[in-house]
Image: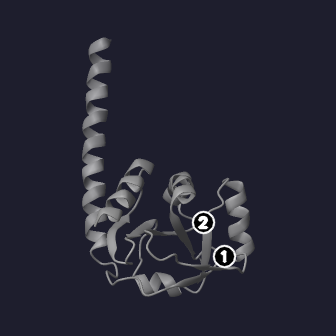
Amino acid sequence: MKSKFKKLVKEILKLSIILIIAMNIISYFKSTQLNKENLAINEFKLIENSKYTIKDNKPLVIHFWATWCPICKIEASNIQKLSKDYNVITIAAQSGTNEDIKKYMKENNVDFKVVNDKDGYYSKKFNIEVFPTTLIYNDKKVLKFSEVGYTPTLGLYLRVWYSKLF
């Protein structure tokens, strides 16, 4: 019985490693298609009709997500944690009205800053085709990292920290 269990655990570990490698390869190729220009936007209109002005000399995370995306839902708590310590703007794509997004956020216990991209303006501007996608800019608004797909909390924090160095 122990032998079968050990074999099963080994197979699960092998499969997990293969999946992680495959996801990173896909993420890399998807991120090469993103708009890599420096950030030229200084202000966003949030779903509660307030405006958010990007703070100079601080890193910025722009996170694209959707209410219908299951991976986005899993990653939302990571973005929530990061938003408490850093400048984070999230852009909800194809997610309905502001009220739909507010309801989703309440149900999922998140309160980060959200822009409703109902017409796809920002998704097109940044060439976003896959959700979630996270862009991390340094304090000079230069793109340092782009992640397509799920990113763990520690990975997000390390990327923002690294972006502050260069």
Residue at 25%, 46% (x, y): give it.
Answer: 18
15 over 64 or under it: above or below? above
Task: Work out whether 127 lies above or below 12.
Answer: below
Residue at x 47%, y 81% (from the top left corner): 123
Relative to residue 74, is residue 101 drawn left or right? Answer: right
Report x, y in % for residue 164. 35, 64
The answer to which of 144 and 10 lies nearer the viewer is 144
SS at badge 1: loop
For disc 2, the marked residue is 67
Q: Are marks 2 and 1 in contact (CB under 8 Å)?
A: yes
Q: Tell me which corner region of the image, top left, top right, bottom left or bottom right, holds residue 142.
A: bottom left
157 relative to 88, above or below: above
Q: Secondary structure at mark 2?
A: loop
User: What residue is at 70 percent from the left and 79 percent from the top?
Assistant: 50
Image location (x, y in percent) of residue 54: 52, 78
In-image side of 93 versus 27 (left or right): right
- Is residue 107 shown to the viewer in this render? yes
Q: Quadrant of the C terminus?
A: bottom left
Residue situated in front as seen by the camera: 99 or 152 = 152
| Kind of residue sitting beneath label 2 | Thr
Label 2 crowd bin: few (<14), some (14–19), many (20+), radius 10 Å: some
Q: Is residue 58 above or below residue 108?
A: below
Amino acid of disc 1: Gly
Q: Which mark is residue 74?
A: none
**Residue corresponding to mark 1:** 96
